[in-house]
Each structure stands twice: as C-alpha cells, then as structure tokens.
Amino acid sequence: MARSDKAPADLATRLDTVRAGVTDAAREAGRDVAGITTIVVTKFHPLSLIEALYTLGVRNVGENRHQEAQSKAAQLAGLDLTWHFVGQVQGKKARQVRAYATVIHSVDRPSLASALASDDSSIDCFIQINLTDDAARGGVDPVNLPALVDTVLATPGLRLLGLMAVAPLATEPRRAFAHVRELGEQIRTQAPSATALSMGMSQDYAAAVLEGATHLRIGTAITGNRPVLG
Ligand SMILES: *Cc1c(COP(=O)(O)O)cnc(C)c1O
C-alpha cells in the first residue's frame, strides 16, 4: 500500500497533531521521544481505518473487546501490526486473546494470570491498576499490587513490562499518573525490569508523558469520534 492510498486527509492531520504533541511533551519532560510508544486505539472503527493508519506509518494498535479484536487481527494478519489488548479479559477467553495479542495491558487478578500461563511461548503484559473505588472498572486495587506482581512473575509465559492505568474522571490526571509512577517505582524492588508505564489517552497524554509514560493509548484524538454501535 502506498502512503496516502487510503488515508483521509483529516486522519493524517490528527495523527500528525498528536505526534507533534507527544514530541512537545517529551521535550518539556526532558525525555527522548523514542522511548514513548503511541498505540492508536481503534475500537469500534472499521478495518479500513486501521489500513489507513497503516499507510500513515502506524504499527501499534489497541482494541478493548475480544471478539472485535480477534476478527480484526485475523483479517489484517498480512500487515506487520502489533496488537495491544487494553480491555478487560474474561478468564475463559484468556487463551484466545493471547493467540493474537502481542501485549495485554489489563492483567488485574491472579486467576487471569493463571489463565494466561503458557509453557510454550511468552507474552508481554502490564498489570492494570484501578485508581477508583469502583471495582467494575477493572484493575487491581493498589493494596493488592505486590501480591499480584509476585503471581505474574511466577507465571510461566508472562513477561511483566510494568503498570497500566486510566486516570479517573474525578482526579487531576497528572496526580493520578504520578501515583502510578510511584507504584511503578515500588514494584521495581520485586520486578527490576518492569519499568514501563501504559498511561495517557486523548485528553491527558501530555500529563502522562510528564510523569514517565512509555506507552500512550490514544483513540479519538487520532481516529475521530467512535461510531456508535447498536
Ligand atoms: C478507549 C480506550 C482508550 C482511548 O481512549 P480515547 O479517550 O479515545 O483516547 C485508552 N485506553 C483504554 C483502556 C480504552 O478503553
């Protein structure tokens, strides 16, 4: 596919704007932008949008619903895309998610770690932190983080990259991300190589970069509004 084969001009403009925003935030933070991976979250959007992003150089895409992600990954298997699963994973679907995902951002309980275990291959993962009081949001309560880190480290086939979180609506994002960074520093005593931080979305990625995010998960700022599904 040639560049601009399929990519609408507004998509290219939004992508360029976010890339420039990430570069600016990295400069402000005194960080090398090469240490920051921008994942474009393409949930609800059609395959054609992912193909268009591909022609614009995007190689990291994120999805949050298993069936949709599985189908898209199968249909786009010919493209060298890295699939990031950022949604909640049901234990009984864990092995299927593992089959197409390169990175799972949402390990949040010991039973899910066990369901993802494998003696044959390794997959990268993040432990998701829940920064709210609402258990339905997914993520582990920070008080249970050290035990979950131990479980993940002891699980064959899981390589722990670091921590993932979504900033709660009620909190100033930078404070929330600073909290995640501190938790990341704490788990280094258990998992010295788990240095990555998956945090920052369309509205708050600059704050996340200032607090050390290594993986940004950006949807609407790049894709435009998500189609409404029935
Ligand atoms: C949808 C989603 C995003 C992207 O959200 P935007 O606000 O569209 O950038 C990031 N992370 C997770 C876990 C998501 O579900």
Image (spheres, helix red, strand yellow):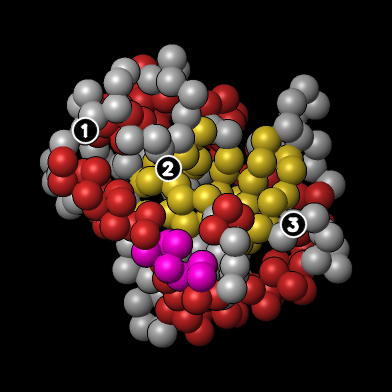
What amino acid is at disc 1?
A: Ala
The secondary structure that most of the magenta stretch takes on is helix
What amino acid is at disc 3?
A: Ala
- Find disc 1 in the rendering and name its residue: 7
Give the left or right position of residue 166, taking residue 104 as reference: left
What amino acid is at disc 2?
A: Gly
Q: CA distance from mark 2 to mark 3?
A: 20 Å
- Find disc 3 in the rendering and name its residue: 194
- Find disc 2 in the rendering and name its residue: 62
Q: Is residue 208 visible?
A: no
In the image, which residues are magenta? Answer: 21-27
Position of residue 209 measured from the top left corner of the image (x, y, whole percent): 51, 69
Where 119 sits versus 90, above or below? Answer: above
- Given this view, does label 2 or label 1 mark the residue nearer the observer? 1
Determine whether the residue tagged by mark 1 lies in a helix, strand or loop.
Answer: loop
Q: CA distance from mark 2 to mark 1?
A: 18 Å
Label 1: how many Cα within 10 Å (few below 14, some 14–19, many 20+): some
Label 2: how many Cα within 10 Å (few below 14, some 14–19, many 20+): many
Counting residues from the N terminus, which is met first, the one under dot 2 or under dot 3? 2
Q: Does the beta carbon of the residue at mark 2 sit less than 8 Å from ligand 1?
A: yes
